[in-house]
Every structure is written in C-alpha cells, then in structure tokens.
Image: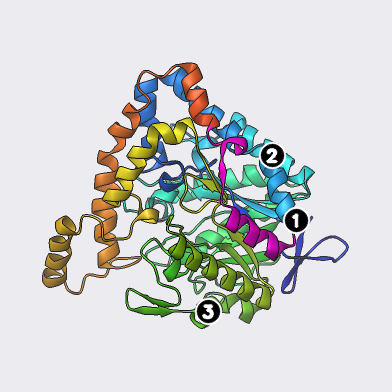
C-alpha cells in the first residue's frame, strides 16, 4: 500500500513510486465530448430512457460500462508502461437523490471489477468522485445541468458526500492496488470560504474509515488554487491540473499566441511551476491529476499538440512529477483510442452538428455561431464592462449559458431520437463500439507515451 514520504510516494519497503498513467473519463462518469451526447449525463440518461424504455436503456448503459473497459484495455495500458489509472465516478452510481445517505451496493460492481483487473496487471487505481451531490463545480463534468455549484451552498450535499466517502474508504481500506482517493474533482467554490472547512471534515471522516490510503486533494478553482488549505494533512498529495492554453480546441499555434497569450516550452514550465508552488513549498509529492491537448484531425495542428505533450512530459520528468493524462478512450477528441463502428455510424453526423454549434465546452473553439453570439458578447462588454463572474470571466460565462447549457439541452431530444426503434441487439452493438477491439488507436500518441514510460 502506497504512502507519502516527503516528496515521494513509496511502497511498504520504501521503494519510490511515481504514478504515471491515464484518466478513465467517460466511463463511471460520462461526459458529453467523450461519448458524443449533448448537455450533462443525468439529463442525457433521462432522455434516452424516455425513448428506449427502462429495460432497453438499462441494457445499453450496462453493456457500455462492461465494454468500455475490459482486460484488453488493462493489458494495453500495462504494456505502455502505465502504472496508474485515475477512475472518475458519478455519485449517482452509489447513492440516489431520492434515497440520500443510502449506499447502493450494486453500484460498486464495475468499480470493483476494474480496480481488481488493473491490480492483476500491477496497475494502481486512484478512485475519485467527479460528480458530487449538488455539483461541486459549474460545468457539465460534475453532471451539472446549470451553472451553479450548489454543493457549496447546502450542508446537506456536503454531509452526503462525506457519508459516501466513508463507505468508499471502508470498502477499499485493505486493497493494496488502490493508490488512494481523489474525493472532489475540480472543486469550484466561488467564495473560497466553504471548501477549507469542508476538507477538514472530510479528511477526518475518511481517516477514521481508512487510516492508511493516500488522499489526493484538488485545489479550489478547478485544482489551481491551494490557498484554501489551512494545514498540510498527513499522507496527502495535493493535486494540480495543468492544461495548456495552446492545447485547447481554440489553441495554437505552438509555439505561438493563443488569444493574445504566448505559449512555448518556457511558458509551459513557468505555468507548471506556478500551479505546483504549494506542493514544492510544503515538500509534498508533485502529481498532475489532469492535463492533455485536444486533437483536431488536422496533421499539422495535431503534430503541434504532440509537441505540447512531449514538452509537458519532459517538464514533469525534470521535476519528478507524477501525472494522469486525460483521457484514455472517447469518440475522437483526446483519447489514446476512440470508438468506431455502429456508434459512430449512427451518431457521427450528430457529433458533427454539436461541433458546428460549439455545444460542448471541451470541443468548442469559442468562435462557432459568431454571427449570433458576437453581438451578445459586444452588448455585455458595453453594458456590463465590469462583469467578471467566477470562475473564468464574462466571455466564458456567456458561452457556458448559451452554447453549453441552452443549445446543448435543446439538442438532447435529437440525440435521444437516434435510439428510436432499436432492438436489444442493436443497442448492444452500439455499446460494443467502445470495446477496444473495435476502437481506432491514435498510434502517434500511443508511441509517444510508450517512449516516455518505457513500455
């Protein structure tokens, strides 16, 4: 079982371990850009259930969870040299809003399966909640249908999260291949006043349930602000996220300017050092919980994205930092591998429509439908020049409200209707499009990672 020793993670015999691997996004916490639907996960599931019915919808989602990660996936990652997989989980698998504080035992079945499977290949798991009751941040990846992170406004949601983490920690307290727990992914507490006391309560409760596993704690404002920590908890890794501006969908060229900001390797290192300052000042391990560029399908642009990734990996190597690349598998935006076959045949045109409208934050260049949104941005700049909403300011907030909530939710019926009339065999075929043997491998990315990891 891993433990924190100064700036390193070590095994029981004091052997240093630098966790380097991938995030298993889109699996137990689904995301719109990863599997191709619009809006947030719970809204999508409801829309699909209305079309398919309860039984057939359950068949599709259960088969998707089974096919998305199997022994073949574990073998591929282990062969690359990966020694860690960060597993994001939506709390709705483990607790119902209709029955708060009641843990759903059946909800652990796939998590247990994959944690054990990875362990059989010598790969650690970091188990994390990406979606907490009430939503801990303002965006789709916390399964938030709004732009309000209500988790920080209601003690009820916080109490439920602590209760759930007590159950998770108790369940895996003896598991040697669980590296630890990442309780709150990318928290977005606008005041910055609730998160510190909440972490104090959470750490105390989790330590009572499992005193030995490592805690991986994200800073506030999407794992970038560590001023909220009032103490350095023992056996804890403080997790930063390190996405490069030039690697976003609207980024580039590299080296070059993105939205007026210069980015080259020197700037990547300066940014990393700023984001990891708290860890270096406190002498705690360096671990980048998420990072990674977006790929476009254009060879020249994607080669620049690979260069960003190579530079970031070299920087992390120079600092002895561990990392978890986002993400392993998707429909073509970031994954090491991406789905093909019946799912893309059926939903490919719809995914293209989402891209044209900029309906997914993580796939948007922020320039789609400029003739429609441009005047709105100009009006707000003129009429509310001082408006700077948390977390990213006026331009991002406007896009979130219009593109990624309003337009995305308006597209939900169209996505769901594409399931209309499908048989049991049909929905199984759709889900199996995410099985590794049917996926396309992004070979330059696989080769790049294998070269860094020695796989």
Callout 2: SS: helix
Does 122 appear in magenta?
no
Residue that mark 1 sits on:
212
Q: Residue 400's spot in the image, x, y percent?
A: 29, 55
Work out which residue is located at the far right of the displayed protein and give it: 13
User: Which secondary structure class fits the magenta region best?
Assistant: helix
Q: Which stretch is magenta? A: 433-455
Q: Residue at x 51, y 50 (%)?
A: 130
Per the rendering, the mark at residue 265 is 3
Per the rendering, the mark at residue 72 is 2
Q: Nearer the viewer, mark 1 or mark 3?
A: 3
Q: Residue 60's spot in the image, x, y percent?
A: 49, 26
- Residue nearest the viewer, comparing 162 with 190: 190
Q: Nearer the viewer, mark 1 or mark 2?
A: 2
Left or right of 39, for residue 131: right
Left or right of 306, for residue 348: left
Q: Residue at x 66, y 71 (%)?
A: 321
- Residue nearest the viewer, comparing 263 with 386: 263
Which badge, 1 or 2, is on the more N-terminal residue?
2
Q: Residue 182's spot in the image, x, y percent?
A: 60, 55
Does 446 appear in magenta?
yes
* Mark-to-mark CA distance, 1 and 2: 31 Å
Q: Residue 395's spot in the image, x, y percent?
A: 26, 65
Screen quadrant of the N terminus: bottom right
Callout 3: SS: helix
């Amino acid at each position: 079982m891993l433990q924190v020793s100064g700036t390193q993670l070590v095994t029981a015999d004091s052997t240093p371990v630098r966790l380097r691997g991938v995030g298993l996004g889109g699996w137990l916490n689904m995301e719109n850009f990863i599997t191709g639907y619009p809006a947030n996960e719970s809204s999508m599931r409801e829309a699909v259930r209305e079309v398919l019915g309860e039984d057939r919808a359950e068949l599709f989602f259960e088969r998707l969870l089974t096919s998305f990660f199997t022994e073949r996936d574990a073998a591929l990652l282990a062969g690359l040299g990966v020694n860690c997989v960060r597993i994001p989980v939506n709390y709705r698998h483990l607790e119902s809003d209709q029955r708060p504080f009641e843990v759903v035992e059946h909800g652990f079945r796939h998590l247990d399966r994959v944690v054990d499977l990875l362990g059989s290949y010598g790969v650690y798991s970091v188990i994390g909640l990406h979606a907490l009751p009430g939503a801990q941040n303002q965006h789709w990846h916390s399964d938030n249908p709004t732009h309000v992170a209500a988790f920080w406004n209601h003690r009820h949601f916080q109490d439920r999260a602590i209760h759930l983490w007590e159950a998770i920690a108790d369940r895996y307290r003896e598991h040697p291949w669980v590296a630890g727990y990442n309780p709150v992914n990318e928290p977005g507490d606008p005041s910055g006043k609730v998160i510190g006391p909440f972490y104090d309560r959470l750490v105390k409760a989790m330590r009572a349930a499992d005193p030995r596993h490592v805690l991986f704690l994200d800073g506030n404002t999407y794992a970038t602000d560590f001023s909220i920590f009032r103490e350095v908890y023992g056996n804890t890794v403080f997790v930063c996220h390190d996405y490069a501006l030039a690697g976003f969908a609207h980024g580039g060229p590299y080296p070059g300017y993105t939205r007026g900001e210069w980015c080259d390797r020197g700037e990547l290192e300066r940014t990393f050092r700023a984001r990891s300052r708290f860890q270096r000042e406190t002498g705690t391990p360096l671990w980048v919980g998420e990072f990674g560029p977006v790929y476009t399908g254009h060879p020249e642009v994607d080669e620049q994205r690979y260069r960003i990734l190579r530079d970031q990996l070299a920087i992390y190597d120079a600092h002895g930092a561990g990392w978890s690349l986002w993400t392993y598998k998707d429909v073509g935006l970031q994954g090491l591998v991406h789905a093909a076959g019946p799912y893309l045949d059926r939903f490919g045109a719809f995914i293209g429509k989402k891209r044209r409208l900029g309906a997914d934050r993580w796939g948007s260049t922020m320039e789609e439908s400029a003739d429609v949104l441009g005047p709105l941005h100009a009006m707000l700049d003129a009429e509310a020049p001082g408006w700077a909403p948390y977390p990213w300011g006026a331009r991002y907030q406007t896009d979130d409200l219009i593109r990624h909530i309003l337009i995305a939710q308006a597209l939900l019926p169209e996505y769901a209707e594409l399931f209309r009339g499908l048989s049991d065999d049909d929905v199984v075929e759709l889900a199996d499009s995410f099985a590794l043997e049917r996926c396309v491998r992004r070979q330059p990315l696989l080769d790049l990672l294998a070269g860094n990891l020695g796989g």
